[in-house]
Structure formats: C-alpha cells, structure tokens
Image: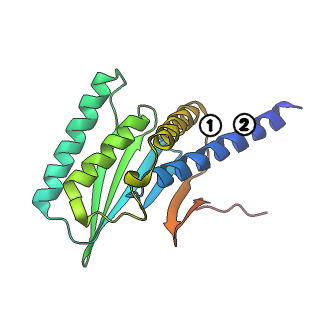
C-alpha cells in the first residue's frame, strides 16, 4: 500500500468517524435540530429551534450564561480558551439558535452543559424530537456519552475535509456531505 492509498484510507476513516459523531450527538440529544461540522477551524455548530420568538432580554441572558459557563468549564478542565459563538434567527413564530464551538477544546460534558443551558433558558419553547433522557437506561446514556467523547478525540486528531450536516427527518437521523463547490471532470 503506497502513501496515497494510506492517506485516502485515513480520510475515509476520519469521515466515517465524523459521520458517527454527528449521528451520536443527534440520537443522544433530541433538542438539537441539526449539527454541522465545518472543517475550516474544526467547528461544530449545534442548531436548536423554538416554537416561539425569543425576546432580546431572554437572548441576552442566555448568551451571557452560555459564554460564562463555557469559559468556567474550560478553566476547570484546564483546556485552552474556547471559541464559542451564538446566533439567533427569527422567523414569524419560530426562532433558530445556532451555537458554534471549536472541536479543539470541546468535550462531551460541555455539550451536555450547553444542552442543559438551552433547556433551562428556552424551557417548553425548545422543540425536541421524541423522548428525552427520562426513558433511557443510565447505562445506555453513559455508553453514548463515552462514544461521543471518543469520537471527539478522534476528530481532534484527524484531518477532515468534508463539511457535514446531520439533521432529523420523520424520526430518522440523516447525515450529508455539504460541499458547496463541485469540481469539473
């Protein structure tokens, strides 16, 4: 096997691991509507939806708590300075919240923290598909959390070139390659 074949196999493995990570996150956290992986900067974007508009006051309080919590968490686990960004889009009676985090310092526990902050701040307005954790066995949740952490570690160390998006549709989780440019043959 030559170097080119080894490199292609490594890219294929890293793509498979990235796809598995997006699927695992969506299965574990029904509050996340979509999750994107952006290879430039190794960013994960978590998208939430609400069934009503989010007031400026609520949004400001949520962002303050989010940034503060992520910074404190990172300092406690001795990770580098996290890059976190929060955006809100308003449509008639629906809001879309997108939280972006660099993979370099992201942990599974921090993903859980972000989810809990969203649950607390957005309450019953947060759209969630299917059952939440209450119906799950504790061992299954621990296993899912461990898998997510392992795949985050793999993603940090791999070379991933594909933009991926994972989302829910009719009870299924789908992941697609989101490349915007096509090469001509």
Question: Mark 2 and 1 residues: CB-CB less than 8 Å, in contact?
Answer: yes
| Image quadrant assignment for residue 10 | top right
Residue 10 shows which numbered tag? 2
Using the rendered view, name the quadrant where residue 132 is placed: bottom left
Instruction: Report x, y in % for residue 59.
Output: 17, 57
- Indicate left or right for 44 with 184 as reference: left
* Res 176 label: none
Residue 146, given in percent of the width and then of the height, sits at: 51, 35
User: Looking at the image, can residue 183 be seen?
Assistant: yes
Position of residue 134 relative to residue 148, above or below, is: below
Task: Identify the mark nearer the N-term, 2 or 1.
Answer: 2
- From the top left corner, tell me how far across and down residue 33 is, in percent: 42, 62
Identified at 67% across, 46% down, the residue is 16
Tell me the residue at 29%/47% (across/down). 116
Q: Is residue 163 left or right of residue 65?
A: right
Residue found at the very far top of the displayed protein? 78
Q: Residue at x 17, y 44 (%)?
A: 64
Secondary element at tag 2: helix
- For disc 2, the neighbor class at 10 Å (few under 14, some 14 to 19, many from 20) is some
Front residue of this view, candidates 133 and 39? 133
Q: Write the residue at 22% across / 52% down.
A: 120
Query: What residue is shown with label 1?
Result: 159
Question: What's the distance in space between the residues labelled 2 and 1, CA to CA?
Answer: 8 Å
């Amino acid at each position: 096997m030559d170097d080119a074949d080894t490199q292609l196999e490594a890219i294929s493995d890293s793509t498979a691991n990235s796809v598995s990570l997006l699927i695992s996150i969506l299965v574990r956290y029904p509050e996340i509507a979509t999750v994107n992986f952006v290879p430039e900067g190794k960013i994960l974007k978590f998208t939430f939806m609400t069934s009503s508009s989010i007031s400026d006051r609520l949004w400001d309080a949520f962002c303050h708590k989010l940034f503060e919590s992520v910074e404190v968490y990172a300092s406690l686990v001795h990770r580098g300075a996290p890059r976190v960004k929060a955006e809100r889009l308003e449509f008639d009676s629906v809001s879309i919240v997108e939280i972006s985090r660099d993979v370099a310092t992201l942990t599974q526990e921090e993903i859980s923290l972000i989810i809990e902050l969203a649950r607390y701040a957005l309450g019953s307005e947060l759209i969630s598909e299917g059952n939440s954790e209450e119906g799950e066995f504790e061992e299954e949740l621990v296993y899912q959390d461990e898998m997510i952490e392992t795949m985050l570690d793999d993603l940090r160390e791999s070379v991933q070139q594909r933009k991926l998006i994972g989302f829910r549709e009719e009870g299924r989780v789908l992941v697609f390659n989101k490349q915007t440019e096509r090469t001509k043959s």
